[in-house]
């Protein structure tokens, strides 16, 4: 046991975090015209700036990378300008914020693609999942397999997205390599049937993620770059036969890039932690920098994992939606407010920026 606590400061590369609590990336489907972040986004994130680190909602690096209605991008000047309002608001409150870079791959619909094109994927296999488009849940569209000549363009979109994020004032970026989206689709052999240099062996299936990570670190620096992985999550219909060896290899390779953090979804995203046997400690041991643990954590489990040195930082998702002052509530062991599932996705200020702090709720 150690004397570490969730509430002590932590050095994340060059950043000085006020505590070890992280706002996990949370899609809220509130972007406006042009896929510009919501007019309320600066308020939403600044309300949660007491977290040691905030990670933004997943943000597409191109129109091709979009998979859901009303999610923000980071590929136009208007998007960059609105994100700058968000980062300025967070920094004014003393917070630190990374942008999560996203390409959904096959988890999309033709109605979201330029000229109603098919979504792209490692292989032409439709995902067993739905998306939200035209104000309703529908089956995702049949994808087409990316040609090998197109992959450098995908890598460059991630690189440019990282550059745009820094221009928007973010302290760094998180590469979304999890939850059945494009980079995870390449990693997981259920979605990747390629016979070229990006398919087959674990080394080939990891290639695109590693190329993206190398390009982003080259663009903005390793101390501003993190990666999110979900080794065993079945989110969006992906799986792999040998997750332990696949992801130990990936983490070993990411470690050589000296990334500032590894963010791991432990178990099924938003669901059970112990869905299949997997040694997450082996990933922590292989990664020399910061390990962020995520999925199903409450105060007690988070406290024990940090105290036992099984994680450096803990990311909390849904508890932060309805508790903007989650850090203070944890410190004082105040009760948590439940979220309203009806207002979780889409809409305006309601269910987004109107959840009161504990102090405010007591005074009502």
Image (spheres, rainbow, N blue to C red):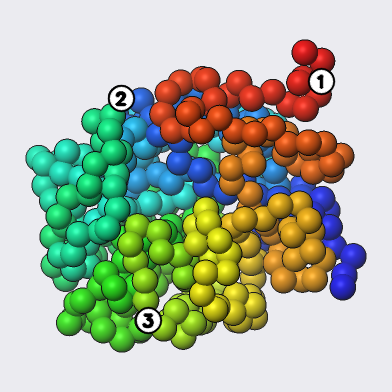
Left or right position of 64 against 85: left
- First reached walking from the N terminus: tag 3 or tag 1: 3
Residue 53 in percent (x, y) is at 65, 48
Locate the C terminus by quadrant: top right
Tell us which disc is closer to us: 3 or 2: 3
* Residue 349 in sight from this viewpoint: yes
Left or right position of 198 against 290: left
Locate the N terminus by quadrant: bottom right
Q: Are marks 3 and 1 in contact (CB under 8 Å)?
A: no
Please tell me the numbered disc located at residue 362.
1
Q: Are marks 1 and 2 in contact (CB under 8 Å)?
A: no
From the image, tell me which residue sits under label 2. 33
Residue 170 in percent (x, y) is at 53, 43
Of all residues, the one furthest to the top in this rendering is 364
Which residue is located at x 34 percent, y 33 percent?
70
Q: Is residue 195 above or below residue 272?
A: below
- CA neighbours of label 2 inside 10 A, class few (<14), some (14 to 19), many (20+): few
- First reached walking from the N terminus: tag 1 or tag 2: 2
Please tell me the numbered disc located at residue 241.
3
Q: Distance between the Cα atoms at labels 3 and 2?
A: 41 Å
Residue 313 in percent (x, y) is at 69, 59
Q: Is residue 73 above or below residue 123?
A: above
Task: Give whichever of 156, 51 is nearer the camera.
Answer: 51
Q: How many marks?
A: 3
Q: Distance between the Cα atoms at labels 1 and 2?
A: 37 Å
Left or right position of 306 against 3: left
Task: Give whichever of 66, 225 is nearer the camera.
Answer: 66
Question: What secondary structure is marked by label 3?
Answer: loop
* Residue 287 in sight from this viewpoint: no
């Amino acid at each position: 046991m150690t004397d570490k606590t969730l509430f002590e400061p932590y050095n994340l590369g060059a950043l000085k975090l006020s505590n070890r609590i992280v706002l996990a990336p949370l899609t809220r489907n509130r972007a406006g015209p042009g896929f510009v972040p919501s007019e309320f986004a600066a308020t939403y994130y600044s309300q949660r700036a007491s977290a040691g680190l905030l990670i933004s909602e997943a943000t597409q690096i191109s129109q091709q990378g979009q998979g859901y209605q009303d999610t923000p991008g980071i590929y136009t000047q208007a998007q960059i300008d609105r994100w700058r309002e968000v980062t300025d608001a967070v920094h004014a409150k003393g917070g630190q914020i990374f942008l999560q870079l996203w390409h959904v791959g096959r988890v999309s619909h033709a109605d979201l693609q330029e000229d109603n094109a098919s979504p792209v994927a490692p292989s032409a296999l439709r995902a067993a999942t739905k998306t939200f488009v035209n104000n309703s849940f529908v089956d995702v569209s049949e994808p087409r397999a990316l040609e090998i000549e197109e992959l450098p363009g995908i890598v460059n979109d991630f690189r440019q997205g990282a550059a745009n994020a820094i221009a928007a004032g973010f302290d760094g970026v998180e590469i979304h390599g999890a939850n059945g989206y494009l980079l995870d689709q390449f990693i997981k052999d259920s979605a990747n049937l390629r016979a070229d240099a990006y398919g087959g062996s674990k080394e080939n299936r990891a290639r695109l993620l590693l190329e993206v990570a190398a390009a982003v670190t080259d663009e903005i620096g390793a101390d501003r770059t993190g990666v999110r992985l979900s080794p065993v999550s079945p989110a969006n219909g992906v799986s792999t036969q040998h997750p332990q060896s696949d992801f130990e290899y990936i983490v070993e390779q990411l470690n050589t890039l000296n990334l500032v953090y590894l963010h791991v979804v432990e178990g099924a995203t938003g669901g059970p932690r112990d869905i299949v046997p997997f040694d997450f400690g082996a990933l922590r041991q292989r990664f020399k920098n910061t390990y962020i643990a995520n999925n199903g954590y409450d105060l007690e489990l988070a406290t024990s994992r940090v105290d036992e040195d099984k994680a450096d930082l803990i990311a909390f998702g849904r508890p932060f939606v309805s508790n903007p002052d989650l850090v203070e509530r944890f410190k004082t062991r105040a009760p948590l407010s439940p979220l309203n599932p009806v207002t979780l996705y889409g809409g305006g200020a309601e269910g987004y920026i109107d959840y009161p702090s504990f102090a405010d709720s007591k005074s009502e």
